[in-house]
Image: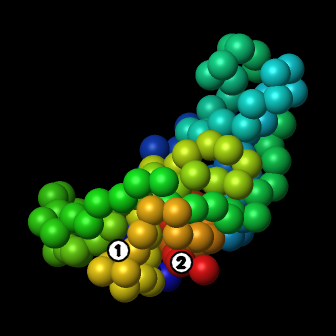
Amino acid sequence: MSNLPTPKPPIDPAIAVYWSAAAEGRLVLPTCTDCGLVHWYPRPFCPDCSSRNIVWTDSDGDGEIYSFTITRRGQGVYRDSSPYVLAYVELDEGPRVLSNIVDADLETLAIGQRVSATFDIVPDEDAALLRFHPT
């Protein structure tokens, strides 16, 4: 578990399967059975073809840093957590995920660096927040 805050996420019942898997430390990605798109952010329809024929596919959570920034002055619940990293991670399955990079030397992070999924449990909720750490 990282030192970042774990605020309660908005849990939409239509994607409860995602949150249940996250609480178990597993990453599942919505995959359209009509056009084959693996997409992010989890939703019960395909953002490409609008199909509602979605299956939840297990992911190993591996990818690489596509882009990142070191936030040195946080806001809200993150105010006392600075510095921290906000990054787009491109998963090996294709989608790009906006998340945090944790357990890393901030000064050595690089675009293209390999990362893996990790989950921070949200206290008193059946959920966990997806984050990534260098591999």
- Which label sits in the foreground, 2 or 1? 2
**Camera-side residue of 62 and 131:** 62
**Camera-side residue of 72 and 56:** 72
Point 35% across, 74% down: residue: 4
Point 76% across, 16% down: residue: 51
Residue tagged 1:
4
Label 2 element class: strand
Label 1 element class: loop
Contact between marks 2 and 1 (CB within 8 A): the answer is no
Q: Position of residue 17 (x, y in %)?
A: 72, 47
Kind of residue indicated by mark 2? Pro
Please say whether residue 76 is visible from this viewpoint. Answer: yes
Q: Position of residue 47 (x, y in %)?
A: 62, 22
Point 68% across, 49% down: residue: 18
Left or right, residue 135 beside residue 108: right
Q: Position of residue 112 (x, y in %)?
A: 52, 63
Vertically, is 27 above or below 104? above
- Please tell me how crowded label 1 is: few (under 14), some (14-19), or many (20+) other residues with Cα within 10 Å: some
Residue tagged 2:
134
Left or right, residue 56 beside residue 46: right
Image quadrant where residue 109 sits: bottom left
